[in-house]
Image (cartoon, rainbow, N blue to C red):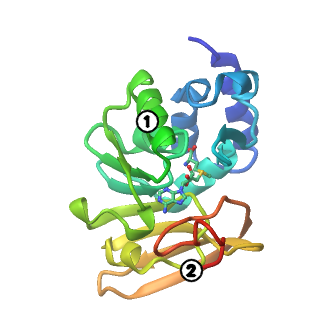
Amino acid sequence: MEYERERSNLVRTLRERRISERTLKAISKVPRHLFVPSIHISHAYVDSPLSIGYAQTISAPHMVAIMCDLLELQEGHEVLEIGTGSGYNAAVMAEIIGKKGRIYSMERIEKLAKSASESLEKAGYSNVDVILGDGSLGYPEHAPYDRICVTASAPDTPKPLVEQLKKGGIMVLPEGDTYQNLYVIRKSMDGEITKENRGGVVFVPLVGDHGFNAFTGNR
Ligand code: SAM
């Protein structure tokens, strides 16, 4: 299989970061080279973020892996992702949740949504729907979700996303502007919300009604 050696080297690097075997197995299967622009293809299996145009990035594989582990994804889950970008994170999650699960992934930049859909199709992921729109409002059409994964940094936790999380569900999201932290939000079976800070990260901003302003950059 193409790039198999590069993928196993990447998996070896990630194993040193104590990523779960389930997530490593998914990473070992997803052809990241199909999700990066052709000018970056030689760096597709380097553990770093890469530009995907429109001032956006495909996240580093270790960040994708950490978020998948924090989400505690299970087979059959319905997952809402905010920030499709290249589609790579959606593909890794789709591997973990399997054919009985579904990913609804939202992207606000039309050209990225289109190219991510094409890459996902080429890579054979039919359990991912890419939706063009403001993900800070969530996607009520299929709510509530078992898991919500936000891959752009919000000024604070968008209320619609908390509302669209299932009881017993988990949401992972970065928050902050200059200084950002990654949070794990859990909704108990009683509807109680807890929020745990898992440390500093760097993401592009979440832009939208419950995100930063597209023109001023302010909240
Ligand atoms: N998950 C992506 C991947 O695997 O390539 C990386 C995502 S990139 C770090 C963040 C993405 O969030 C960008 O593509 C950006 O356009 C998108 N974004 C920002 N605000 C958004 C919003 N309100 N709704 C949907 N997408 C948004």
Q: Nearer the viewer, residue 192 or 90?
A: 90
145 vs 65, nearest the viewer: 145
**Residue plotted at (40% across, 50% down):** 105
Locate the C terminus and report the quarter of the image it occupies: bottom right
211, above or below 204, in the image: below
The amino acid type found where label 2 is placed reads: Asp
The residue under label 1 is 114
Tell me residue 110's x, y (percent): 45, 44
Report the side of 87 relative to 43 (left or right).
Answer: left
Q: Distance between the residues labelled 2 and 1?
A: 28 Å
Q: Can residue 75 be seen in this view?
A: no
Q: Which of these two is toward me, 203 or 192?
A: 203
Quarter in which the N terminus is drawn: top right
Using the image, determine if residue 100 lies above or below residue 157: above
Tell whether circle 2 marks a residue whose Cβ is less than 8 angstroms from ligand 1: no
Residue 169, by quadrant, is: bottom left
Query: Can you tell which of label 2 and label 1 is closer to the viewer?
Result: 1
The 10 Å Cα crowd at callout 2, few under 14, some 14 to 19, many 20 or more, is some
Q: Name the residue under label 2.
A: 156
- Above or below residue 143? Residue 117 is above
* Number of the label disc, if any, that sits on residue 64: none
Residue drawn at x 49%, y 39% as measured from the top left: 111
Residue 68 seen by the camera:
yes
* Circle 1: residue type: Lys
Quarter location, residue 155: bottom right
